[in-house]
Image: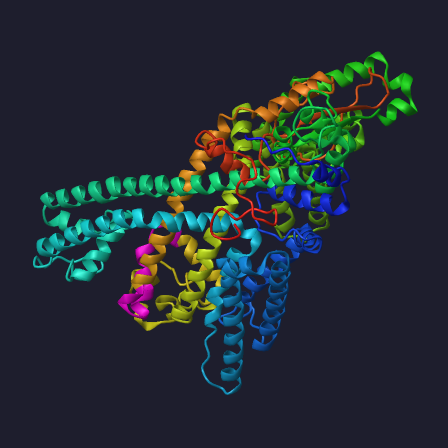
Amino acid sequence: MTSTSRPDARACAEQDVKSQEDLELASAYVSDAQYNRNVFFDTSPRAVRLYLLYNRRLAQVLLYFFILLDLSLALWEEPAVVPLPPWATMLAELLCLHVFALRLVHYAKVIPQDKFWKDPKNICMIAVLVLTLVDMIVYGALHAAGCYALRWSRVLRPLLLVNVTEGRQLRRAIRSIRNALPQILTVFLLFIFSILIFSLMALKLFSKRGLKTSEGAAYFSNYADAVFDLYVLVTTANSPDVMMPAYDASSAFALFFIVYILVNTFIFMSVFLAVVFNNYKKYLKEEVRLLVRAKRHKMARAFAVLQECPEDGDAGEPRVSRASWSRLVRSVQPDMGRAHTELLWSVSDHQNRGAVDKTAFVQLADLLNIQVMTLKSRPHPLGRLCPAFYRSAPSRLLCRLVRHRAFAVAYDVIIMINAVFIGLDEDKPSVGYSEWAFLALYLLEILLKLYVTEPRSFFAAHCFWNWFDTIIVVCALVATVINSALQSSGGYTSRQILDIVFILRVLRLIRVVDSIKRFRTIMNTLIRIGPAILTFGQLILVVYYVFAVVGMELFKGKVKFEEDAAGGPAAADCGNPLLRGSAFARLGYCKNNFNNVLNAFVLLVQLTVVNQWHVLSSGFSAVTHKSARIYFVLFHITVVIIIINIFVAFVLEAFFLEYTLDKSNLHSELEKKIEELQLGVAQEALEDNLVNAEETSDQEQPADPSESVEPKLMFKIASKRYRTVDALLQRLFEADLEQEDGGDDAHDANGNFANPSFGSA
């Protein structure tokens, strides 16, 4: 990393006094670097204050609330789950549009105007807002006139989730897919060509032989049906049904289908996975490289704002003083404790010079993302109320027994035995009495742990398993008592309370997962990659919403499910005579329809699973037109072939990384400093488990009756998971990322940096 040129004397004199405006500007840079925001904001004091307000958590939460409200309007719009008058949903949508417009105006106030109008996401947001408003006006006028009206702008609503500033991970995923599409398209065209060739061969082989399908239809009678049936065969959804008529006619025909499956299912689908992931990963790595570069530039600018010149006659580069550094950290993370701040300073200023240079300062953003848990050792209340009894030999022995590993193992065995009884007939008196015994043992466990552990420590905010155990046991006890009381009163036949008891018993089995180290490692890994999985979840939600809205407009009312008419004519044809005798109606798929958004989402999930998707598509094509198959094929290509393949490959890559995770250099330096200051917590005392994967704030360390009652302050790295998806992505590609200069070579004249790609990422 190149050094910054030494400022002149006048600049030094100006920089020695750090104003509140300097601090706000530096904190904006550091906050952007910490959360990987890459916004080209104006550096004037007013714009910086507005930008800090723009990034407040409350403002972001409210924004997402109104986005969810806007998306959820489909529940009340025709075709609706719960119908509301059009004016009610339109008023709610108008409120959402006002919030989005205000947020957009706020954003326009904090970045230069030329940058605002060059940013594609801003143009897209404005277009969505204008088109939605126009659609509402046209729809309202047509509806008032009694004419048919279509709310076509509903399909644009997911674009709001994509194009808000906070949707950068989602935009990054979409951009990477878009950039990889040319290479994906090449393989896809070859794949389609293969299907077309095989379909032509199937048409010539089977169309003139008078073969029939299991439903009595002509077998490979026309080219369009042959292409569709063989495309479905690639997904294995109609295997071996599509092959059986030909196979029954001659065993030799099986060779055709075997070769087809080998070429298109095993080879082409594997190539698809490789090509999709390889190209996606290539473009994603480039995005992350630019992201890391932008982060280093942000930190370099923050350093330039806060730097102080060396004393006269002293050699060396500019540095940031401890006072400025501390004010900056308090401004960026106001909830950080003083002890935690001192710990981070001791890591940054490891040479005890009272100031940090540029190299150490640039690492601050990553240092803030390491989750450090502060543990406070407090004396047990019994130790204060009756110290002689609590510190007696029997009491200490009991505490050691409860803390011993054998105690946890014993209760794991009890839980497993309880699982056996759960599977038995609950009507037997012996089984019913056993539940009271198990509840008594679980209550005893909690009481013993409370005897050993200081209550505030036991019920600390993020002590997941303690809260889990207590809530499950108490709720099970209450439900069991209520159930027994109602049964003893006579006339009680409902199983609702009994079902709650059974569910609570089964949930208790989750505790066993945490006690097995191999299971615990896998669960911790899944928790760590959770944010990355959620990004793809948002992407699938966007695609689902678009296809659901389009599907509702195309197929609403074509298929009906009438629960009261089960077994009657409506059940036989799903409310549509065109489905009478079809596989769709015969298999009871009537509830798989597009009559409201919830049913549409369930149907799309079933299409994603792929099994029987050809039956679903054939049902809707039967009630509309054969061209309706295009809708289902497009959904399969978009979600199953592209998005799911990328999702699977990304999860595998992230899982392998996390499963073999070594601590980063900053991680190691921080732990070394904790050990050096003798403020560390023994690993055996706080063994990694699912709780550690969840803990992110101050905790309280269990007290020992044999120890001093003086409170102690201890530290521990809370977990290895990342605060942001960007940090995980950086770790995925850090072996390939070159160490770039963190200097000032790319910044604009106003002291800011250009966004590396695609506007404000």
Q: Which residues are magenta?
A: 607-628
Query: Which residue lies at the image location 32% right of the left edge and 72% below the top edge?
Result: 577
Q: Is residue 596 left or right of residue 199?
A: right
Is residue 214 at least partly visible in the picture? Answer: no
Q: Which sits in the foreground, 268 or 744?
A: 744
Q: Is residue 575 left or right of residue 198?
A: right
Query: Which residue lies at the image location 34% right of the left edge and 53% below the top edge?
Result: 636
Q: Which sits in the foreground, 161 or 482?
A: 161
Q: Which sits in the foreground, 503 or 224?
A: 224
Q: How many marks?
A: 0
The part of the image, by quadrant, that contains residue 586 is bottom left
Viewport quadrant of the N terminus: top right
- Colour scheme of the picture: rainbow
Is residue 545 at least partly visible in the picture? Answer: yes
Is 547 above or below relative to 32?
A: below
Chief secondary structure of the magenta portion: helix
Q: Which sits in the foreground, 175 or 590?
A: 175
Picture coordinates of residue 488, whole percent (x, y) = 71, 47
Is residue 276 rendered magenta in the image?
A: no
Picture coordinates of residue 518, whole percent (x, y) = 52, 25
Outermost residue, bottom side: 145
Query: Which residue lies at the image location 36% right of the left edge and 53% below the top edge?
Result: 638
Picture coordinates of residue 17, whole percent (x, y) = 77, 40
Is residue 609 rendered magenta in the image?
A: yes
Picture coordinates of residue 448, whole percent (x, y) = 76, 25
